[in-house]
């Protein structure tokens, strides 16, 4: 349960950060479109970096040399 809460906090923190950094008033349709575009781009980069990180971890040599 703590992991789910941490994940939700991280996702919400990212959304609030994007809103604050770009001064987006979400009561205007064009601002909502901008927010969705930037948020989707952030999520896409987050997933891409996660895949790269996981790929790097799987290629590492985890067994010590004798």
Image (cartoon, helix red, strand yellow):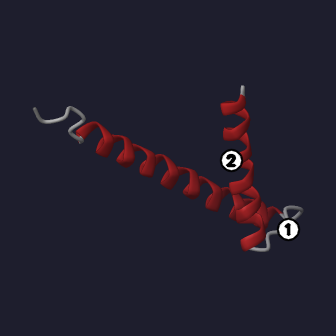
- Residue identified by numbered label 1: 25
Q: Position of residue 63 (x, y in %)?
A: 20, 32
Relative horizontal placement of residue 45, taking residue 35 as reference (left or right): left
* First of labels 1, 2 by sequence position: 2
Closest to the observer: 15 or 8?
Answer: 8
Mark 2 lies on residue = 11
Mark 1 vs mark 2, foreground winner is 2
Q: Residue at x 28, y 37 (%)?
A: 58
| Rendered residue at 77%/59% (across/down) | 16
Query: Which quadrant is the N terminus positioned in?
Result: top right
Quarter of the view holding residue 51: top left
Residue 30, given in percent of the width and then of the height, sits at: 77, 66
Q: Is residue 3 above or below residue 21?
A: above
Q: Is residue 4 left or right of residue 53?
A: right
Residue plotted at (44% across, 46% down): 50
**Nearer to the camera, 30 or 46:** 46
Q: Secondary structure at mark 1?
A: loop
Per the model, the C-alpha gap separating discs 1 and 2 is 19 Å
Quadrant position of the C terminus in the picture:
top left
Which mark is on residue 60? Answer: none
Give the total of numbered labels. 2
């Amino acid at each position: 349960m703590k992991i789910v809460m941490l994940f939700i906090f991280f996702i919400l923190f990212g959304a609030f950060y994007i809103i604050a950094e770009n001064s987006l008033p979400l009561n205007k349709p064009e601002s909502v479109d901008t927010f969705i575009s930037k948020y989707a781009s952030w999520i896409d980069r987050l997933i891409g970096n996660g895949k790269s990180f996981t790929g790097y971890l799987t290629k590492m040599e985890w067994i010590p040399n004798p």
